[in-house]
Amino acid sequence: MSNPERLSFISGVGRSASGRRLGRTAMDLTLDAALEAIADAGLTRDDIDGIATYPGGDAIMSRGFGGPSASAVQDALRLDINYLYGSGEGSAQLGSIIEASSAIAAGLAKHVLVFRTVTESTMQGMAGRNPGGGMQRMGGFLMQFGAVSATNWFAQVAQLHMHKYGTTREQLAQIALTCRTNAGVNPRAVYRDPLTMDDYLNARMISTPLCLLDCDVPVDGSTAMVVSHVDYAKDAPHIAAHINAVGTAQIGRPSWDQYEDMTSMLAQGVSKHLWSRTDLKPADVDVAELYDGFSIITLAWLEALGFCEQGEGGAFIEGGQRIARTGELPINTHGGQLSEGRLHGYGHVYEAVVQLRGDAGERQIPGAEVIVAANGGGPIAGAMLLTKGIRD
Amino acid sequence: MAIDHDILAVRIAPQDDPETDFFWASGEDGKLRFKRCQSCGYYSHPPTPRCPKCLSGEMVPEVVSGKATVLTYTVNVQQWVPGQEPYIIGLVTMDEQDDLRLTTNLVGVPLDADNIIGMRVEVRFLARDDVWYPLFVPEGTPE
Ligand SMILES: [Zn+2]
């Protein structure tokens, strides 16, 4: 085992119901997902000896952005555990999964329950929109100028990308169109009706050049997984989604407006770090599940991860064929957050596991054996490379 | 010199913070200030008690020219606040240092202008409740 992260794999996955305004509590959803993940891993709750979440904290205080704290779930399931972690800092949402992997590598736990729960749809319905969401703490020199939403912050990235590299709205549209096409064969997706280029170009502008269809859709839902030590792989009921490498580096200023290359994000350093920890190359990747809180984030990840050169993302996705399910690099095969709904990073990892197992049904990518999952945008980033079955 | 009309229906005030209070009060005399290292000359924004380059603790607010170039921008259209008209959020690079950047509003710039990136701009202040917000107008705009 060349990297400590290869001591762990994702043994189980689970999901609650997800959708708009479910009207259920974060804990209720979380327990559904957690129990499903534990059973899917072939385990019982007595086997769980660690728990980790992003971002931790209180779902009410954060208006649905955060789920229940790790300790609240520990108590609800009456778990006795050796390791607990919950933080909004770290390698984006994926940081909680990487933390679980690290705890296993350190010998602190054997089976770590990880989860991410959002109830933003219900909470917005109760209390009105909450621009900036849980990210207000990052807006110290942004909010005062009406840059109150992450849409504004990423819009400036998209604008500069278009100016500097000639990227067009028609090119960027392919992220949203591809996600929608994939969501059409995902029964759990919120938006499944076909989307056309005309629909995109005529959609309401939010913050130029990003329109409504460049922005993901808040939902309620919980996603959970079990991260286990590789010793368990031979006994686990499903083929392992093995953690081949992680990217956790934070290179450059972690800031929405002070990062040196404002056509990109901290995704750049994370991607370099990821590839430095594996012999696999971008060309080996069969599927890419790339965070799409906003379409421009996915484009930035495609470039940062080296699927194309910096600035060539627009040309790379032009026409959409390359990133379609039948293309050379299918992306966001579940529909992404743009169409399936904002399960906030964990949805991408869940889909990666399902694809590696060959259980994605109509949307299955044949021969999917290496999948990269990337989370976060702006000053928040983490990435993970997963393989089908254990590889040394 | 000052800007009287606010393009924002609701402008969020900065929180009191001994580290940044000088920045929001700087415009009272019509001048923009950033903290500058007295040892190596580096400007630091957002302000920090030590120089992020040489770690000197001698960081003193210094007046800058107020001249800048637009690095990128967005026209916010979504009405986060009911009735809010579209407005421009800009990210500008101050002349003094190529990584001295400030998110701000661009005022007096047509929303559909196609030359905003790279536009030369200069500071004007909007005063509200003892806060002087540094906004930017095209260079040479009559005072
Ligand atoms: Zn210095």
Image (spheres, coloured by chain):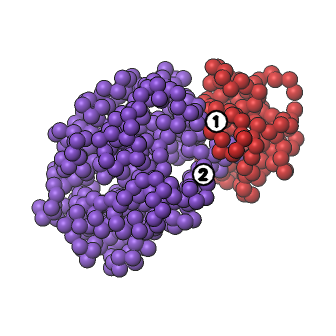
Chain colours: A purple, B red
Please say whether residue A152 is visible from this viewpoint: yes
Percent position of residue B136, x then y: 75, 32
Residue at the farthest left position: A234
Residue pointed to by mark 2: A129
Which residue occupies 55% across, 66% down? A60
Cα–Cα gap, marks 1 and 2: 16 Å
Asked if one can make out residue A291 in the rendered structure from this viewpoint, the answer is: no
Q: Is residue B11 above or below residue A212?
A: below
Image point (31%, 26%), residue name: A321
Q: Are marks 1 and 2 on the same chain?
A: no
Mark 1 surroundings: few (<14), some (14-19) or many (≥20) residues within 10 A: many
Residue A112 in which image quadrant: bottom left
Which residue is label 1 attached to? B76
Q: Along the line of sight, which residue is nearer the eye, A258 or A30?
A: A30
Specify few, some or many for label 2: CA neighbours under 10 Å numbering under 14, 14-19, or 20 or more: some
Dot 2: chain letter: A
